[in-house]
Amino acid sequence: MAEFCGAFPVLPGKADAVRTFAADCHARREEFAASLRQAGVRREQWFLSPGGDFLHVYLEAHDVAAAFAQIATSTDPFDEWQRERILDISGVDMTQPGPPPPEKVLDVSA
């Protein structure tokens, strides 16, 4: 299982929109879960930074690059809605290639 952890910017004044987006995704849980399964994502978590400047996204997938490719190209109405919300909240266009993923430099279990 591969992992991704990255920070997406939150545009000024959009922290509450992130919370609403998360609540909407939760309300549409079945559609969201189907989208994740289609992309090969086993788990996804979101963390809003203090001050609301960044949304940290953690996900586990069979193939992270393939998962992002699926999200970028899907014509499923839920996926299209999700891409629109991400663009509105962060300015990130999920249909375009992004920067390289962050490098994991520590993984410790006690």
Image: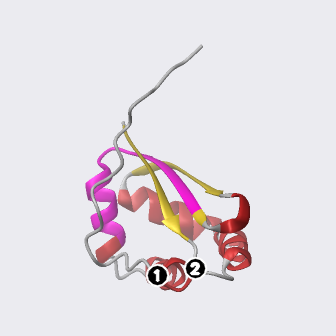
Q: Nearer the viewer, residue 104 or 37?
A: 104
Quickly name the residue at label 1. 91
Q: Amino acid at mark 2?
A: Leu
User: Which quadrant is home to the N terminus?
Assistant: top left
Quickly name the residue at label 2. 11
Could you say which quadrant of the image residue 13 lies in? bottom right
Q: Which of the colour schemes (rainbow, by chain, secondary structure, one colour) is used?
A: secondary structure
Q: What SS does tag 2 mark?
A: loop
Report the number of numbered marks: 2
Magenta-span inclusion, residue 64: yes
Residue 36 in picture, x, y percent from top left: 46, 59
Q: Amino acid at mark 1?
A: Gly
Q: Nearer the viewer, residue 87 or 49?
A: 49
Mark 2 Cα shell of 10 Å, populated few (<14), some (14-19), many (≥20):
some
Residue 48 in picture, x, y percent from top left: 66, 60
Could you say which quadrant of the image residue 56 lies in? bottom right
Residue 46 in picture, x, y percent from top left: 60, 56
Mark 1 Cα shell of 10 Å, populated few (<14), some (14-19), many (≥20):
some
Over which residues does the magenta segment extend? 55-71
Q: Nearer the viewer, residue 96 or 69?
A: 96
What residue sits 58% from the left and 79% below the top? 11
User: Position of 40 compared to 57: left or right?
Assistant: left
Q: Nearer the viewer, residue 43 or 87?
A: 87
**Looking at the image, do the residues carrying marks 1 and 2 touch, with CB atoms under 8 Å apart?**
yes
Could you say which quadrant of the image residue 3 lies in? top left
Magenta-span inclusion, residue 59: yes
User: Position of 36 compared to 54: left or right?
Assistant: left
What residue sits 55% from the left and 66% below the top? 32
Question: Marks 1 and 2, how far apart in space?
Answer: 7 Å
